[in-house]
Image (cartoon, rainbow, N blue to C red):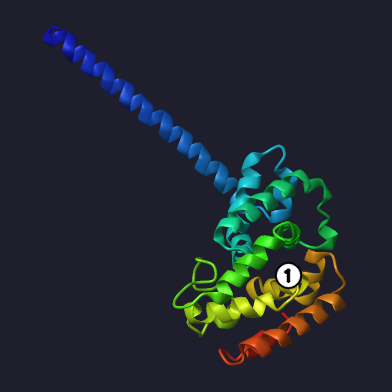
Amino acid sequence: MTSRAFRVDERCNHFVRCAGVVVMGNILDQHERAMRRWSSVDDAELLRSSRRAPGAFTELVRRHTDGLFKYAAIRVGPDAAQDVVAETFSDGFDRQDRFDPSRGDVRGWLFGIAAIQLRRHAVRERRWLQHAAAATGHTRLDDADEQELRTVERVDASRLAPALASALLSLSPAERDVLLLYALEEMSHEQIARALGIRRGAAKTRLSRGCARLREQLTPTIAVNDLERSEP
């Protein structure tokens, strides 16, 4: 190859690389603009728009994945929690026409779906809690961050994990549903009732019963007075 031909070939390669950078830059810019477009939209509108605009549902997933994952991971472990979260969003996308804003917000609706999905993992939930309750040393309940439950903010989570797992195991699934929505998501009795499709009185009763059992189980490890916060 002559030096002139080599220089021409190099120039062509340079132009191709530059064009590729420009194209990728445009794609990324479009993606960022699309994400910014939905970032200020409320959840209900995102859900309404999700069939015709995939970016809307992507934003909904971004907003609620962490909360749903923590809610599931403390009950079934991190691996199964990923399945629960994926199933929740898949079911939510398929059932979006059934969402009724007069019965609660999208966040509560998604957690209600997650609670249903967790019923399908009942065996895994019991096995995970039994395993976590029997753990020693610094085994964590969920491998997530240090804020598994607001009630244990002042306690070393690794030390508390087995006792907490044992306490959760003593509750019924319905009591765990209510207690963890209250503790992790700071939902009120009314919000919990709407999310789970139960009466407010039932939510309050299950929470009271769950707190009492947790107090009995955890008193040697932690004072659980934090559970008895005022109604938000």
Answer few, some or many: residues within 10 Å of disc 1's Cα (few below 14, many 20 plus, some between 14 and 19).
Answer: many
Residue 38, position as x, y percentages in the image: 61, 48
Which residue does the numbered mark 1 point to in the structure image?
A: 177
Q: Is residue 22 left or right of residue 157?
A: left
Taking depth in this image into account, of 151 and 73 the one nearest to the observer is 73
- Give the left or right position of residue 23, taking residue 134 as reference: left
Residue 4 x %, y %: 14, 9
12 vs 36, left or right, is left
Type of amino acid under label 1: Asp
Residue 81 at what x, y percent from top left? Answer: 60, 58
Residue pictured at 69% horizontal, 58% vertical: 121
Viewer-closest of 59 and 135: 135
Q: Is residue 158 above or below residue 213?
A: above
Whether residue 35 appears in this view of the structure is yes
Q: Position of residue 42 (x, y in %)?
A: 68, 55
Q: Residue at x 76, y 80 (%)?
A: 207
What residue is drawn where x is 81% and y is 46%?
97
Residue 71 visible, this orientation: no
Residue 18, picture quadrant: top left
Quadrant where the image shows the N terminus: top left
Q: How many marks?
A: 1
Given residues 232 and 158, the one toward you in this image is 158
Q: Secondary structure at mark 1?
A: helix
Rendered view: 161 above or below 194: below
Quarter of the rendering occupied by the C terminus: bottom right
Which quarter of the picture shows residue 123? bottom right
Residue depicted at 70% across the width and 71% down the height? 181
Above or below residue 213? Residue 141 is: above
